[in-house]
Amino acid sequence: MSTDKNLSLDFYKYLCQKIGSEEDVRVRRLTWIVHDLGFPEVPHITSGSIGEGLDIKGSDFDIMFIDLLFKVYESDRDVNVRIIKIPLVLDTANTHPCFTQLRLPLHFHDDSNLLNSRMKQMFEQDCLVNKLSNEKYKLDSSYILNRDSPQTEPLYTIHGPCLSDQYGTYDLAFCLKCDKWISPAQSWVSRPRTTWPSPELITKITSCGVLFVPIGCKGSSRENLEWRISFSVAEKCLIYSFSHTQLLCYALLKILLKEIVEEHEDLKGLLCSYFLKTLIFWISEESDPSIWKPDNIIQCFMACLKRLIYCVEYSTLLHYFIPDNNLLYMRFNSDLKHSMTYTLKNLYQQGIDCFVNSETLKDFTSLNCEIPVLLTQQTIKESYPVSRKVTLKPFLYYMLHHCRWTNLARRIFTFFLSPEHDDLELQDSKFQPRSNNKHRYNEYKRNLGKLSIVLSSKTIPGWLMLASFFYVHKKYYTSIIIINHALKKHQDEEFYQNNIAFSLIHNKDSVRTLLQKEKNPLLLKTLTLDYISLGKNWPFIPPEVKLKKTNNLIPTLPFAHFLHFLCYYHLHADTSCKQSLQKIYDIYHDITTKDKADMNLFLSLIHSTFYIGIGFQMIGDTITARKGFNVAAHYDINGTTDAADRLSSLS
């Protein structure tokens, strides 16, 4: 193999580490597909980089909600009056390419009283026809989302065609749908091309129809009445059909733009991810698919960059589906064009060495080519809001009982079962009527399979439940390895920052005030202190711990060190036993200096002293054990633990 091919192959493997392997991308995509399917009553599509399977700096997180009150048709004759939705018809007579106005059908009679007073206010009369205003539509959507907010500040503000949350975490786009492929994009279906996209993919895309988002062409005299034609579904299908090399080249272009080009203040906002996506669509359509190989990735990327330079230099980048629309027309003046061209040409001359100036790929020269196994588990965790609860029980039940337990399946469905893991009925094989060896082994495997589903979802709780499961089954070394992994996750401040950012999407009221007061990473760690939620009869609770309540919240950090202690105790590792107890005591001592009114700290105080009592009782130090039980019983006013009973037995 030539030196160039070797370098490309090494670079490809490195990118799989930093951006994601093929499996990681599949996991990200399937995670969001399952999420989208989980809300059939509110059809929506996860779009942007996150929906495409990329998770890099600056990745946009967009959710497109399809408004079921409206249905768009291309012409009046297509309108189906039997469908109980407000019909709208395209009007492209006086609009720029990729834009349209949406009007009520001629001779429209609202026999079903679909247009209430609120709906009527969103229409404006233009040329004797009622047209839907994109501005009024967005204002109405914003009003609906913000009306129940107790805050004076709105939760969502209008940003282009979207409504952005106040933290800039994600964008919501309420859009309208036409079920058929429209005439302005018909040339895309039949134009000459090499082999991509395939006829089958084209058929699939056209069957999905098109969307319309509420924003007009900038500077148009009827800007407030225009809607942009969106091919988000089609673009997502095309991205999904990319080889992994194509996807990585697309990601490289995004990193180049966001982390290198836009470091130049005057170049910010001149190009966008959509332009890069369009560019790679055109290149893919014009090229032989066989060139997109791992050992050719550097050459492929350089070809993409060269094409981008050409597009900027000649201010020409045609819309992929409607080529009449030049995306770069009047995009920048001559000075900015010269500056952008100069910058891109300079980067082109550096080759892939230009990435030493990027945050994501600055260490690529080290080229560690081993792809870590746990990357996909991190991928799911970081790609999905861990606090989100979705009602997917029928779907998940089917998967649980009919899916072969491949590694990928376990990783995918973790996020959709874990918020509901309290509902999983784990069987205790020790107390089954048919408790023969085969039956117990089958129950063991079944419980292990169910537990494995939650590994990546809540990180520490998921791993510790599995560690406790192995401890109960006397697999102490396995349990220790898993506990160590969980504790390593606990020390990862970046994880907690990601966790809290996603949690803010659905838990604003409980976290917002604290975040506004303090932005210290340690606070983020405190705010995201997780619990294990266990019932008192769950089979993987260590027998040394007796829970008296039906539902129990167990703070993870004290429990992790207590599990460590139990494993080392049974392995007769006395020094490690004492070290684990010391770590629990350190947690207790740290809590005594803080506000115990905080629920996180209050529960940690109870459990840490309870574990101190059990641990020292097991090693024969009843004096220290009594002190631990005394503190736990004093604060455990709800009787969650049996600390009071244990204290009495030692008196």
Image (cartoon, rainbow, N blue to C red):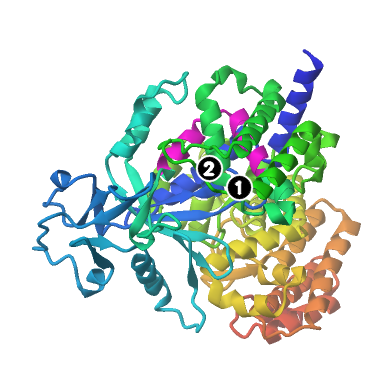
- Decide: is 204 above or below 411: above
* Nearer to the camera, 369 or 250: 250
Left or right of residue 540, residue 235 in this image:
left
Where on the picture, by quarter, is residue 324?
Answer: top left
- Give the residue at x 82% y 77%: 590
Residue at numbered disc 2: 52
- Decide: is 186 above or below 167: above
List x then y, in percent, for residue 458.
61, 57
Please tell me whether the stretch drawn in magenta is mainly helix, strand or loop. helix
Residue 478 seen from this side = yes
Residue 181 seen from this side = no
User: Which disc is residue 271 wearing?
Assistant: 1
Q: Which amino acid type is marked by label 2?
A: Glu
Of marks 1 and 2, the one in the foreground: 1
User: Which disc is residue 185 wearing?
Assistant: none
* Nearer to the camera, 189 or 156: 189
Quadrant location of the C terminus in the rendered image: bottom right
Left or right of residue 454, residue 120 in this image:
left
Quadrant location of the N terminus in the rendered image: top right
Of pointers 1 and 2, the one earlier in the residue sequence: 2
List x then y, in percent, for residue 226.
35, 56
Circles 1 and 2 in contact, beta carbons < 8 Å: no
Inter-mark Cα distance, 1 to 2: 19 Å
- The magenta-colored residue range is 233-255
List x then y, in percent, for residue 596.
71, 84
Q: Which amino acid type is marked by label 1?
A: Leu
| Residue 384 colored in magenta in the image | no
